[in-house]
Amino acid sequence: MAKKKLTPLVLFCCLLIGLNACTRYVVAGAVAAGAAAGTYLFVKGNLKRTYDAPVERVWEATLQSVEELKLATESKKHDAFGGEIKGKMADGTNFTIELKRLSEKSTEVGVRIGAFGDRIKSEAIHDKILSKL
């Protein structure tokens, strides 16, 4: 009698363990494929993209993009390993653009608009940066 009650529980636990392990590989594969394809990664309001260009070149493209989009900057700082631009949009919303050197020829750029992020505006900034590279 106990065996009949225990069997479905054991099968259910095995299913959960199997799905858990499978999900990790699927998610990891999707993230890796997305990064290789140059797609965006939107995490906690921060839209990140990796560019196949050195950090100095991406920095210059980002500065040009911010200027062309007429975004008001409050601070700009950068070095050989990355940089950060902070400012306000015309509607008063804060924005932050962070650059991070991944390798000699690869740079990650994160764009965050406001407290919770605005994917559409962030994508527009990324598109402008890409057009300058």
Image: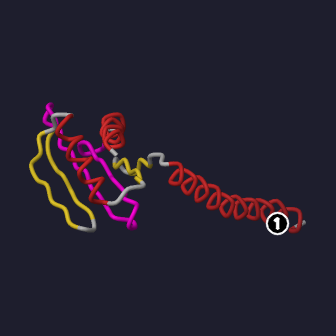
State left or right for residue 52 relative to residue 94.
right
In reply to whether residue 106 is colored magenta, the answer given is yes
Q: Quadrant of residue 121?
A: top left
Return the x and y of residue 99 as percentages of the image width and height: 29, 57
In reply to whether residue 108 is colored magenta, the answer given is yes
Return the x and y of residue 109 as percentages of the image width and height: 33, 53
Which residue lies under the disc numbered 1?
6
Give the main secondary structure of the magenta stretch: strand
- The local secondary structure at tag 1 comes to helix
In the rendered image, the quadrant that contains the N terminus is bottom right
Query: Which contiguous range is marked in magenta?
Result: 89-117
Question: Does 21 sit above or below residue 115?
Answer: below
Question: Does 62 sit above or below residue 92?
Answer: below
Outermost residue on the left side: it is: 74
Q: In the rendered view, how is the structure colored?
A: secondary structure
Q: Residue at x 73, y 64 (%)?
A: 13
Outermost residue on the top side: it is: 91
Return the x and y of residue 114 as percentages of the image width and height: 23, 42
Q: Residue at x 40, y 50 (%)?
A: 49
State left or right for residue 105 relative to residue 86.
right
